[in-house]
Amino acid sequence: MIGYYKGIHSMKRTLVAEVLLVAVVSLSACSGGAGTGTNAGTAPGPGSGAGWTGVTNPKDVIAARLRLMEQMEKLMLPIDMLQVQDGGDTAVLSANAAAVAAMLQAVPHLFPPTTDLYDPKMDTPATIALPAIWKDFASFYNLADAAAKSAGNMAAAEGKDAQRTASAQLRGSCDACHVLFLRKYEKPKAKASDADFDFDAALPSK
Ligand code: HEC
């Protein structure tokens, strides 16, 4: 019983803390993004001051999100395998999905507008994130949120069938965002000079 009351008490405290936090955040939104730190009440919006990495280091932000995506791809390997074969190590599946969920939660915060740098004329552009992201950021944000939830479901899934379903939904949630917001994959175009290429000389003789 004591534990029960304690629980309620600390729940109330958390609630009070949350209400306060919301109040502080909305206050600071009015005063132009100032937090509660040393710059409280004085810090202007993005652009000046330390910590606006989107402004000072946009290329690093792009590199960080690409690295994050690549690591998610690796973590997805055993999860994707569920589509083609039965079973898998549940502990690994669950740990990987939980990591992916946390990473997906960070994803939309790695896309400040200063990283809208896609250049269609470049063969290897700095970023393959399309400008459409910043034209419809709400959709982008929601897709990231939905994907994080799918990963959470994958982490919690128990039993072969539930795991297979959750794995397909998770992969689907990666694809849903990529289809809309990633440069389309194009096969390298054949160049005229390829016609002169001496394939027989290049291939090992039989
Ligand atoms: C909300 C949108 C969104 C979601 C969800 C998302 N991605 Fe991405 N992904 C992107 C964007 C945008 C890029 C391009 C980033 C850039 O170039 O700056 C990208 C790039 C990638 C790349 C690099 C592609 C390449 O050709 O270099 C991989 C790999 C990747 N994502 C894997 C995943 C995986 C795996 C998931 C799901 C677990 C996932 N992504 C979920 C938006 C998303």
Image: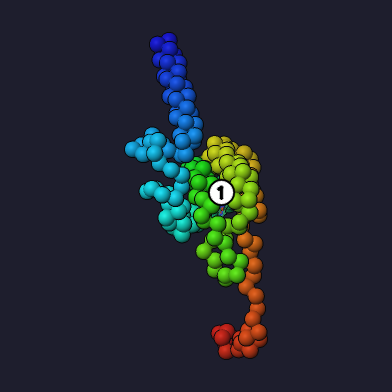
| Label 1 CB-ligand 1 distance < 8 A | no
Q: Position of residue 182 (x, y in %)?
A: 61, 57
Q: What residue sits right under mark 1 in the picture? A: 79
Residue depicted at 47% across the width and 24% down the height: 19
Check the image and report above or below for 143 versus 57. Answer: above
- Quadrant containing the C terminus in the rendered view: bottom right
Q: Is residue 183 left or right of residue 97?
A: right
Q: Is residue 16 left or right of residue 174?
A: left
Question: Residue shown at 55%/57% (left/top)?
Answer: 116
Quarter of the image for residue 10 reads top left
Q: Secondary structure at mark 1?
A: helix
Which color scheme is applied?
Answer: rainbow
Q: Amino acid at mark 1?
A: Ile
> At 63% from the left edge and 51% from the top edge, which residue is drawn?
135
Q: Position of residue 2 (x, y in %)?
A: 40, 11
Nearer to me, 7 or 182: 182
Residue 205 occupies quadrant: bottom right
Residue 43 position, x and y percent, is 40, 41
Q: Is residue 201 above or below residue 114?
A: below
* Viewer can see residue 167: no
Q: Identify the image quadrant of the N terminus.
A: top left
How many numbered callouts?
Answer: 1
Q: Quadrant of ligand 1?
A: bottom right
Depth check: give the residue in front, 48 or 87.
48
x and y percent of residue 37 in the render?
Answer: 36, 36
**Residue under the image location 57 percent in, 71 percent down:** 123
Q: From where the camera sits, is residue 12 visible?
A: yes
